[in-house]
Image (tube, rainbow, N blue to C red):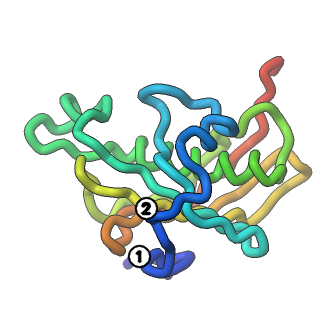
Amino acid sequence: MPSVPILDTAEIDFSNPLYTIDDIREINPQRDAMEQLTAIVHVDEENHVIVGYKEVTDQEFWVTGHMPGFPLMPGVVQCECAAQLGGFYARKFNLIGGDYLGFGGMDSVRFRKPVHPGNRLDLVAQCVRVRAGKLGQFRFQGFVDGQMMFEGEMLGVTVNRTS
């Protein structure tokens, strides 16, 4: 059974982004096929919650090879979407240092339903802990049409170009 949603995505205005792909590029280093966010639509700094989305198209790099004829968004790509959302929040709002935020680990990840091209994958992340300016722990959830598709927890760690 899915966890309680971090917030009700039905109450979020997805038509009026706070940050577009160009704004995201100013913060996140991913480019081309690895860019997994379309826009950021809500930020709640008091509760450390951020909401964004990924427009899943039939042009995604995985479409032709991940279940040909019935493309399913790989779970690892869904997790990358959530990680990029958490990374944007951590870097934009100076939660931890470093040049980048890298994956430090994932726990309790559950995939509930498949995500397909044509879906808008709504993403919610909440920073639940920051340690010594070097590690951020996030809860994350993904939704399509209000239904929870996946959820989990991740650790983001500082990464420096000289590391």
Q: Where in the figure is residue 111, as x and y percent of width and height?
A: 36, 60
* Location of residue 25 (image quadrant): top right
Residue at 83% x, 47% y is: 96
Residue at 60% x, 58% y is: 18
Badge 1 marks a residue whose secondary structure is: loop
- Of the two numbered discs 2 and 1 on the same chain, state the one appearing first in sequence: 1
Q: Where in the figure is residue 72, as x and y percent of width and height?
A: 23, 46
Determine the residue located farthest toward the front in the rendered image.
Answer: 16
Residue at 49% x, 46% y is: 37
Dividing the image into 4 quarters, which one contains the C terminus?
A: top right
Residue pointed to by mark 1? 2
Dividing the image into 4 quarters, which one contains the N terminus?
A: bottom left
Name the front one of labels 2 and 1. Answer: 2
Q: Where in the figure is residue 82, as x and y percent of width and height?
A: 53, 52
Label 2 crowd (10 A; few <14 / some 14-19 / many >=20): many
Using the image, determine if residue 74 lies above or below residue 136. Answer: above
**Residue type, label 2:** Asp
Residue pointed to by mark 2? 122
